[in-house]
Image: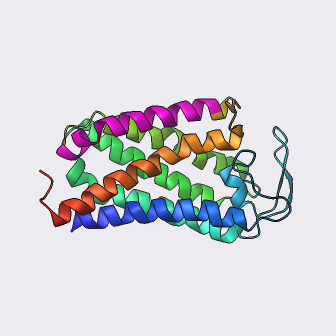
Amino acid sequence: MRNRLAGACWLLAAVSFLAANVLVGLAWDQPRFSWAEHNISDLGNVTCGVWDTSRPRPVCSPWHPAMNAVFVAAGLLLALGALLAYRALRPGRAAAVAVASTVAAGLGYVLAGLNPADVDENRHVLGALLVFALGNAALLAAALGRSPLLRELRTVSAFLGLLGLAGTVLFLSRVDAGIGVGGMERVAVFPLFAWVTTAGLRLLWSCWSRPLS
């Protein structure tokens, strides 16, 4: 039952986050939302205007309440899923680090959603740093885990963790590699959601096949 709930939490977090990125972005009119130019945080900004003195860009997100609600909800689902999945991920310190880091990344999303960038930039940035640093640290820790589930996902965990870490370094360095700074941010952020989708499906499958041992 715990595995089923954990898998459901993680899948719902991933689906809601991706759907919000697409649908809230489609609601933009003036300007049009660009995954290459705009940050994910721009979807949650509550005011319209030119945002960010270091990288000025026009921002106007009519559905910002929905995006901020999804930030909070997805963060809580990530954290809850990690806590519920702990039995399936243990034993070992690597599993504990993976769970703790995922919980912290989830709380980072909650902090970012409760504090849009144009309302309280400092708290929003703190939340984003938790997401970037600990979300990808969770994947690298998972790659070192000893449980059957983590051993099965070792290659996926290592690949996604290294991809997210590289994306984080390049994003914070403002290196776009041809996909825009906004595109690079998604390289930093999306690997965690790809991993919880993969792990969530595996946890759900275990409920209808054989228990993970």
Residue 24 visible from this viewpoint: yes
- 183 left or right of 149? right
Q: What x and y, as percent, mark residue 66?
A: 64, 70
Give the residue drawn at x 32%, y 52%: 199
**Residue sitting at x 35%, y 39%:** 156
* Residue 29 place in picture, x, y as percent: 82, 65
Q: Please state if 102 lies on the left or on the right of 121 as rendered.
A: left
Which sits in the foreground, 175 or 209?
209
Q: Is residue 153 magenta?
A: yes
Magenta stretch, main secondary structure, is helix
Q: Is residue 119 above or below residue 146?
A: below
Q: Is residue 24 above or below residue 138?
A: below
Frontmost residue, 197 versus 139: 197
Residue shown at 40% from the left, 62% from the top: 11
The quadrant holding residue 132 is top right
Spot occupied by residue 204 in the image (x, y as percentages of width and height): 26, 63
Does residue 104 appear anywhere in the picture?
A: no
- Which image quarter: residue 25? bottom right
Answer left or right for 83 relative to 2: right
Residue for point 26% across, 58% down: 203
Where 29 falls versus 131 (above or below)? below
Q: How is the image coloured?
A: rainbow
Q: Position of residue 61 (x, y in %)?
A: 76, 64
Q: State the extent of the magenta-drawn residues as a range.
A: 148-170
* Position of 146 relative to 127 (above/below): above
Does the segment drawn in magenta span residue 171? no
Q: Quadrant of the N terminus?
A: bottom left
Nearer to me, 188 or 27: 27
Q: How many marks?
A: 0
